[in-house]
Image (cartoon, rainbow, N blue to C red):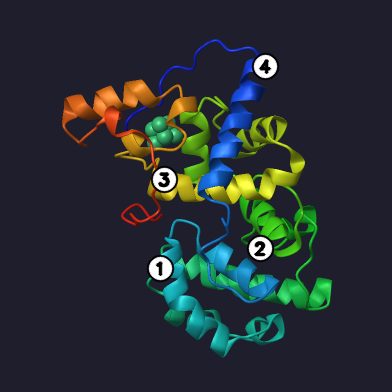
Amino acid sequence: MPAATPCPQESRQAKRQRARRILAALLATYQDAKTELRHENPFQLLVATVLSAQSTDKGVNRVTPELFARWPTPGALAKARPEAVEGVIKTLGLFRTKARNLVALAQALVETYGGEVPPDPRELQKLPGVGWKTATVVAGAAFGVPGIAVDTHVSRVARRLCLSEAKSPPKIGRDLEALFPKSRWIFVHHAMVLHGRYVCTARKPKCARCPLAPHCPSYHSLVNTLAETGSTRASPSAGPTSSTSDSSQNT
Ligand code: SF4
C-alpha cells in the first residue's frame, strides 16, 4: 500500500479551514452516504456490524437474509445453537467466534436490555463481540448518536488527508471530531468509508479523479509514486471527479 505523505506543518486554523473544504466536497459527492450493510432495524444492524469485522459488506449481505429469517429477534437468536449459526455464516472470517458472540450478544440483550438494542454506545460496548467501532457505528446509524467510527477506510483516508496522524482508531476519531461539526459526524463516517472503499483505495488510490485532491497533501506524492511503479494511469490533467463504481476494494 502506498504510504501517506509526511504531513506538512499546518496551523490549527488552516487545518480547520481545509477540513471545511473537505466536508463540502464530501457532501457534494456522497450526499446520501449510509452503511451498505443491509438491515431493517437496530438489531439487524448490530448483528451485521459484528459480522463485518474482517469481512466485506458484500459477504455479510450474502449471509444475513438467511440468518435474519431463521433468528429474527434477540429472543430467537438467544436460543440458537452456536453450531447452527456457524453453518449459516461459515463463509465469513472468524465465523466460529462470531457465531458464539452473536448468541451470547442476543442472550445479553434479552437478559439485560429487555430484548432491545441499547442506543448508548457505552452500553453497546458491554455486549459480547462489540467494541468501540461497532458501538459507534450502531449508535450513529440506528439511533442518530453523533460519533465518527473509524474502520480501516476511515483510518487510511484521514491519515492520507493529514487530518490525523494518530494510529489508534479512537484517537483518529477524536481528531476528526475536533475538525468537523458534530451535526456532520455520522455523515463524515459514512462518506469516508465510501471514499476509502471506492476512490482512496489501499493499493491503488484513484488520486487523478478524486474530488478531495485539491485539499489532499498526499495527492502529488501518491500520483508520482503510482506513476513510477506503473500501478495506475495517473493523469492529473484529467482532474478530480467522483466515482463510486469500482467495488474491487469493497472491504
Ligand atoms: S487525492 Fe484522494 S485518493 Fe489520493 S490520497 Fe488524497 S484523498 Fe486519497
Q: Ligand 1 shows up in which quadrant of the image?
A: top left
Mark 4 or mark 1, whichever is nearer to me: 4
Residue visible at 79% across and 58% down in the picture: 123
Q: Earlier in the sequence, mark 2 or mark 4?
A: 4
Q: Is residue 89 visible?
A: no
Q: Which mark is residue 12?
A: 4
Q: Earlier in the sequence, mark 3 or mark 1?
A: 1
- Mark 3 and mark 1: Cα distance apart in space: 25 Å
What amino acid type should be assigned to the residue bearing mark 1? Gly
Q: Earlier in the sequence, mark 2 or mark 1?
A: 1
Residue visible at 18% across and 28% down in the picture: 229
Mark 2 or mark 1, whichever is nearer to me: 1
Q: Quadrant of residue 10?
A: top right
Q: Is residue 173 visible?
A: yes
Which residue has dot 2 on it? 128
Q: Earlier in the sequence, mark 4 or mark 1?
A: 4
Which residue has dot 1 on it? 59
Q: Which mark is residue 242?
A: 3
Mark 3 in CB contact with mark 4 (< 8 angstroms):
no
In this view of the protein, which residue sits in the foreground, 245 or 62? 245
Question: In the rendering, at what x and y percent does residue 169 appear?
Answer: 59, 39
